[in-house]
């Protein structure tokens, strides 16, 4: 068809001419029949000649075109056979029907005709073409990398229609090796800080202090030399380290063993030295990597120190963090924070205080403490609280029974309607936006203060004007008590507020038995002098009969998972409050030889909660972080969405096994 159209374009159409001549001959015949007869004879000859000549030209042109097509087909075939890139033709099910010599070299001259492509090239999957419908697929064959391009062709056979897939193997091994070299030579920035050098130096003999500093510098220097890096000490307890990315994977495999080496230094120091490390990589520039490293170091410090945090763009990994945070004896930071918070309050029109969802005594107690600090500054203050729950029931009823507090407790909607851009928002006992009682408030003001004692996770409030985060303290109530003490010459709180703060300390320390330091007792002494009555505090912990029975059932269902761990799993249809789960985990630690306990219960139709407790040798925070939770070394929790309780138990057991495996390594 194409040949005919092309021929018609080149050969003149004489039919029109013959018709015109025929008309003229007809006209002549009317006037002279003899001349017309001669014209008709000549016209017939002309028609015969044109017909014969046209057929001859058409036949010659067709032979020329067919000869040219044959040459093109031959050239095409030779080009495909000798193409410098590997080619493979497969059927839709993966059966190899044809290949060229270049492809044979890839597969080491195997016999591959009529074999399946997935068997010959394990890295290739037909699903790449069928499901993902990609234009290109990347495949590795032995030590070579290929970009695999393809197209699907419909072939028309005599009896049936079929499809074949033509594969084009583009060698990109050099590119991949260059990319790998570029990746490995990318600079990594690490910021290192000794967590507790001041405290260590105070407890070390003066003559041995220079030796202690020299030993720290020596060990860090040797460690950096192994990774062919550069180290610069820019303060007495701070270092900046730069090295190539190819060493980072090795450091991660060894869990940053420099942490253990520094902790084992013994130069007469009574307190072990610990490091906080922040590692930044994957940024577009060295400056961005330095910013990642600084954010990572803040995370390490916020999680209690003695650990390394690696930030690769948005991905964050934690290593270490297996020891308790060392209590800082100096209260200089508490005084500085107190004065800064006082200035912020004085510059604000009003103050909003917000804890976490399902508030406990520590959250509500510390909120009341900040409320009192604002009132002492003559500022209007509100506490954002999403209703009552069993954990704060006794304190809540006492508060609403007093005239002063009737209008200060707001729910989320009420708080949103009252807060302004110039308001000060103080978040207590949590640093995670999604865990706050009203996350929307964080968007309504630019003046946000965070006061918390939980170890930092990957989610945290980052747009703060003041962040007081100390993981070594017992509770947020302890931090707030110190703030109140330094904000005025004499601590000024109402009796109920002092008792609420003391209850917050007591609940998080399990009546001053866990995570209790010298400053914890000092804070408790301040609150006692402010009028807190221990009998009234004790009453705030009293539970109703239903709670006691539910806790007993939790304990009854406990089973040993390992010799030193017990797990209690409540029935699937038994919904238990968070308070009961936490108290049950506490009670299970009373069992002889038990070093850690976990309680699982269904809180709602879609949520399973886990509470973990430890005597200190097992880090329940690291275990529950694997399930998306967090907390402290001895106290942690997690929430699992859209899962049945049996599956939650299996995930917990896998997390425990993984934790012990990492400990062995």
Image: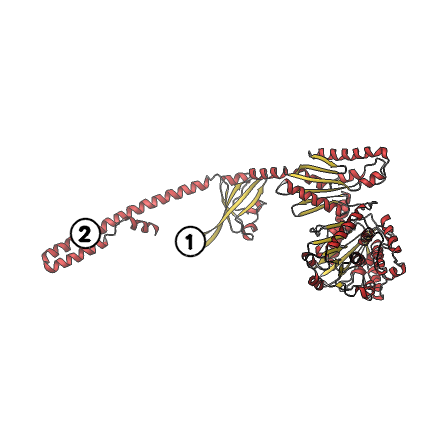
Near-viewer residue (415 or 620): 415
Residue 598, disc: none
Percent coordinates x, y for residue 78 in the rendering: 43, 40
Q: Would residue 593 be seen by someone viewing this image from the given angle?
A: no
> Which residue was labeled with disc 1?
158
- Can you say whether 405 is above or below 71 in the image? below
- Can you say whether 534 is above or below 140 in the image? below
Q: Residue at x 16, y 57 (%)?
A: 24
Please rate how many residues cluster around mark 1, counting C-alpha atoms within 10 Å: few if below 14, some from 14 to 19, many from 20. few
Image-based side of 435 in relation to 534, left or right: left
Which image quarter is the C terminus in?
top right
Q: Would residue 478 be seen by someone viewing this image from the given angle?
A: yes
Percent coordinates x, y for residue 147 in the rendering: 54, 43
Image-based side of 580 in relation to 224, left or right: right
Near-viewer residue (356 or 111): 356
Q: Residue at x 72, y 45 (%)?
A: 298
Q: First in sequence, mark 2 or 1: give its number.
A: 2
Please rate how many residues cluster around mark 2, counting C-alpha atoms within 10 Å: few if below 14, some from 14 to 19, many from 20. few
Percent coordinates x, y for residue 345 in the rendering: 75, 54
- Can you say whether 604 is above or below 591 in the image? below
Residue 46, disc: 2
Q: CA distance from mark 2 to mark 1?
A: 44 Å
Image-based side of 301 in relation to 505, left or right: left
């Amino acid at each position: 068809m194409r040949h005919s159209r092309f021929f018609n374009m080149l050969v003149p159409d004489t039919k029109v001419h013959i018709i015109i001549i025929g008309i003229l001959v007809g006209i002549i015949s009317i006037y002279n029949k003899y001349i017309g007869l001669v014209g008709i004879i000549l016209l017939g000859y002309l028609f015969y000649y044109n017909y014969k000549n046209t057929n001859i030209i058409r036949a010659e042109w067709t032979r020329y075109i067919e000869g040219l097509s044959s040459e093109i087909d031959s050239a095409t075939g030779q080009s495909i056979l000798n193409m410098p890139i590997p080619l493979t033709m497969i059927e839709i099910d993966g059966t190899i029907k044809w290949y060229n010599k270049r492809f044979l070299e890839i597969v080491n001259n195997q016999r591959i005709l009529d074999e399946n492509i997935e068997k010959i090239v394990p890295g290739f999957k037909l699903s790449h073409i069928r499901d993902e419908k990609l234009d290109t697929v990347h495949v590795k064959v032995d030590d070579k990398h290929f970009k695999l391009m393809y197209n699907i062709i419909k072939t028309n056979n005599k009896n049936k229609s079929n499809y074949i897939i033509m594969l084009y193997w583009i060698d990109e091994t050099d590119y991949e090796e260059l990319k790998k070299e570029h990746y490995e030579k990318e600079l990594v920035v690490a910021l290192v800080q000794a967590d507790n050098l001041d405290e260590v130096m105070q407890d070390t003999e003066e003559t041995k202090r220079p030796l202690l500093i020299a030993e720290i510098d020596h060990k860090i220097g040797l460690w950096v030399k192994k990774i062919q890096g550069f180290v610069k000490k820019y303060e007495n307890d701070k270092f900046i380290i730069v090295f190539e990315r190819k060493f980072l994977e090795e450091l991660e495999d060894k869990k940053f063993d420099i942490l253990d080496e520094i902790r084992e230094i013994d130069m007469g120091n009574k307190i072990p030295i610990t490091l906080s490390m922040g590692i930044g990589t994957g940024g577009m520039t060295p400056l961005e990597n330095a910013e990642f490293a600084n954010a990572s170091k803040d995370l390490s410090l916020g999680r209690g120190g003695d650990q390394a945090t690696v930030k690769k763009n948005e991905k964050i990994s934690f290593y270490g963090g297996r020891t308790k945070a060392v209590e800082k004896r100096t209260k200089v930071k508490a005084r500085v924070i107190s004065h800064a918070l006082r200035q912020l309050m004085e510059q604000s029109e009003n103050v909003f205080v917000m804890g976490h969802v399902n508030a406990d005594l520590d959250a509500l107690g510390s909120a009341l403490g900040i409320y009192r600090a604002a009132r002492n500054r003559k500022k209007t203050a509100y506490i954002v609280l999403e209703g009552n729950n069993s954990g704060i029931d006794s304190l809540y009823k006492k508060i609403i029974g007093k005239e002063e507090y009737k209008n200060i407790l707001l729910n989320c909607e009420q708080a949103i309607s009252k807060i302004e851009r110039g308001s000060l928002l103080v978040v207590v006992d949590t640093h995670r936006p999604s865990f706050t009682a009203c996350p929307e408030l964080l968007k309504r003001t630019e003046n946000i203060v965070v006061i918390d004692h939980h170890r930092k996770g990957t989610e945290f409030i980052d747009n703060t004007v003041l962040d007081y985060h100390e993981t070594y303290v017992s509770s947020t109530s302890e931090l707030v008590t110190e703030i109140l003490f330094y904000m005025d010459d004499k601590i000024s709180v109402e009796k109920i507020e002092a008792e609420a703060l003391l209850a917050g300390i007591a609940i998080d320390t399990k009546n001053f038995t866990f995570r209790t330091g010298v400053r914890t007792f000092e804070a408790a002494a301040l609150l006692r002098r402010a009028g807190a009555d221990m009998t009234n505090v004790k009453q705030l912990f009293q539970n109703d009969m239903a709670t006691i029975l539910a806790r007993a059932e939790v304990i009854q269902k406990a089973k040993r998972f390992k010799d030193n761990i017990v797990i209690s799993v409540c029935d699937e249809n038994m919904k238990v409050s968070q308070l009961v789960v936490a108290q049950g985990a506490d009670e299970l630690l009373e069992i002889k030889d038990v070093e850690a306990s976990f309680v699982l219960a269904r809180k709602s139709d879609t949520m399973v909660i886990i509470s973990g407790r430890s005597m200190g040798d097992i880090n329940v925070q690291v275990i529950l972080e694997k399930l998306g939770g967090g907390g402290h070394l001895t106290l942690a929790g997690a929430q699992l969405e859209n899962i049945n309780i049996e599956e939650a138990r299996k995930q917990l057991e896998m997390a425990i096994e993984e934790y012990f495996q990492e400990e062995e390594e």
